[in-house]
Image (cartoon, rainbow, N blue to C red):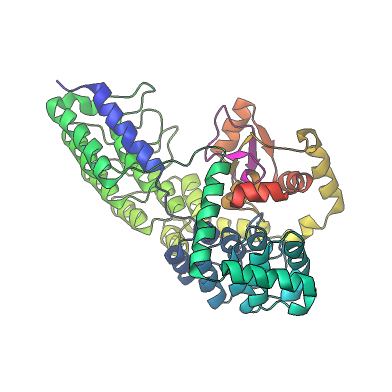
Amino acid sequence: MGKPDRLIAALTALTEDAAARPLPPVNLTDAAVRGDVEAVRAFLDGGAAIEERTIGFASPLAAAAGRGHLEVVKLLVERGASLDPATSVFPLLAFPIANRKLDVVEYVLSAGAPVAKYRPHFRDAVKNGRWDVVDAMLAGGADPGWLSDAERAALDAFVAREQPRSPEYRQRLREEQARQFERARVTPAPKALADADRARHEEAAIAEIGRDPALARARTGNGTPVLALAVSAGAHELARHLLAAGADPDDGGGGDAPLARAAARSDLPILETLLAAGADPNRSAAGSPHPLLAAAVAGSLACVEALLARGAKPRARDLKAALDRAGGPDAARIVTRLEALQTPASATKRRATEAAEAKPAEAAEADPVAQQRARQEVEDMGESIAGQVFASSGTFENLTQVGIQMSVEIRGAVYASSVTKKTTVLVAGAKAGAKLEKAKALGVRVMTEPQFHALLERIPITEEMKRRYLG
């Protein structure tokens, strides 16, 4: 007889491993933050706006530069990204200079960024004896005349001793920054399994199913079916064995259905396996999004096509959400594909709604009465959000999920993708939907976009916050 505890233990290890492997980025800024050059290229080729606005960063270039992702920086500059974004809270190179991302500093200045704008940063580096930063800025075009004779002598001595432009020095610096970043983490970074260990856990789980096929219908202590866990873990062979042994391809146990889980992970092989086993392409019970919506948000055109081929036809509200929230490099193609499902009346109404909601963001930002009201409404939150748990939902004028996440995490808070009892604040935009309803039911504080902007103004980013967040 098989052992449920052994099966669940193996599945737990596999799902933890899957959580340590990031899902594909959902927008250009997300890809830039990760330093994923090929994803950035795919977004640009797909028509993503190279000056995409986010909170905390003026552009994807600023996001990549702040993290020191030189290859992404080069690609964005080659594609025409602005070297002096007009709407930036910080100058483009403020974070790279503060965090000694020397390769990025040299390249961006050499590419034509206005070096005079960074004279205060240059002086600060001299004052604090950060001679590698001084040297990098000089290499990027800073004026040697900004240095006194004594400062130049100190720089020359440092360069002769350390060779800060050498590959060896730059590599030591990157390793040191990585160690500092890990020490500063509030929570440890999840660790992915080695391929051999992952295969071993999956084989152990399959062996338990072989000994007792009835385990294919087993559940964890919180009622999650083992098939749902296998799908979330991306365990293809295990999912196939569970289905062959009689697992219900539609059972989400009160959570996301297996199809929605596969679609959310852009996992086409498992999604097709589930469909072949009879999974309902329109399964969207309480607690689970429509599979087509999950695929659109994940930016998986292949999963969208597979679901449509099997007869996926979401309700009007799910289709509208999919059209509004489609992500990934193929977002435009996904929207085009899904628009074919709309009735003429729905398509006309959507276009009218978009036109009505397209008021310039500057108008709202320029309203002093609205700004003052928003500031007053967040005064009770104090001068810190450290330790609080934020979530977001809906569409915004000047916010993205990635931007909200960065803005709260750099200030010491936690960002979660879902609303739970631990959530303290939900940033809600237009069409916030189920998350908003759940937040209200749980008594979670709901914050509008202007209130969130006002909150960020109340808690300016300090040098210590930058060091902890950017490493």
Where residue 98 sits in the image (x, y, percent)? 67, 59
Residue 395 shows in this picture: no
Where residue 30 sits in the image (x, y, percent)? 52, 56
Residue 441 shows in this picture: yes
Q: Which residue occupies the foreground of this view, 346 or 106? A: 106
Up-down: is 176 above or below 65? above
Where residue 19 sits in the image (x, y, percent)? 41, 41
x 64%, y 50%: residue: 467
The stretch of residues the image draws in magenta is: 409-431
Q: Quadrant of the N terminus?
A: top left
Up-down: is 136 above or below 451? below
Main secondary structure along the magenta-highlighted residues: loop
x 21%, y 21%: residue: 3
Viewed as shown, does residue 424 lie left or right of 9? right
Up-down: is 418 above or below 403? above
x 76%, y 34%: residue: 381
Q: Which residue occupies the foreground of this view, 92 or 317? A: 92
Viewed as shown, does residue 224 lie left or right of 329? left
